[in-house]
Amino acid sequence: ISLYELAQMTRAGPAKSLGLTSICGGLKPGMDADIAVYNFNPDTPVANPDDIEKAFTRAAVVFKSGVEVVRDGEIVSNGNKRTLWVNAKVKENPQVMRDINEKFLKY
């Protein structure tokens, strides 16, 4: 999996599944400008995959709705807060329901 594919799955994918692609999940005019910058060069080959995980555990900078909220892994602002309500619906997946019944509900 490439870093581009990872970004698509973790950022654009959820926005699309929740019907929020007009305001988040990308970088276009009019969108929220939620941006995370990591101290990691995607063009440098990685010998140890743990290095990628380590890089993603501490963002260098995070902007939420265009406001800086994290610098060097430390929270610097509460940013702009809001709640988004969506009417999210997905088809029930029989395998997921079996897994829930077998692994989750018994605990």
Image (cartoon, rainbow, N blue to C red):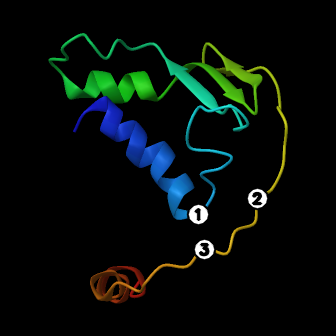
In this picture, residue 56 sits left or right of residue 58: left
Q: CA–CA distance between discs 2 and 1? A: 10 Å
Q: CA–CA distance between discs 3 and 2? A: 11 Å
Q: Crowdedness of circle 2 by 10 Å Cα count: few (<14), some, many (20+)?
A: few
- Determine which quarter of the picture holds residue 75: top right
Q: Badge 3 is on which residue?
A: 88
Q: Amino acid at mark 3?
A: Ala
Q: Position of residue 20 (x, y in %)?
A: 63, 56
Asked if labels 1 and 2 touch by Cβ distance under 8 angstroms, the answer is: yes
Q: Badge 2 is on which residue?
A: 84
Foreground pick, 49 / 8: 8
Q: Position of residue 23 (x, y in %)?
A: 68, 46
Q: Badge 1 is on which residue?
A: 18
The residue under the point 56% across, 43% down is 25
The residue under the point 40% across, 80% down is 104
Query: Which residue is the extreme one toward the front?
Result: 29
* Element class at badge 1: loop
Asked if labels 3 and 1 touch by Cβ distance under 8 angstroms, the answer is: yes
Quarter of the figure with the C terminus:
bottom left
- Counting residues from the N terminus, which is met first, the one under dot 2 or under dot 1? 1
Q: Is residue 66 above or below residue 25?
A: above
In this picture, residue 75 sits left or right of residue 37: right
Foreground pick, 100 / 105: 100
- Counting residues from the N terminus, which is met first, the one under dot 1 or under dot 3? 1
In this picture, residue 62 sits left or right of residue 44: right
Q: Is residue 51 above or below residue 94?
A: above
* Element class at badge 3: loop
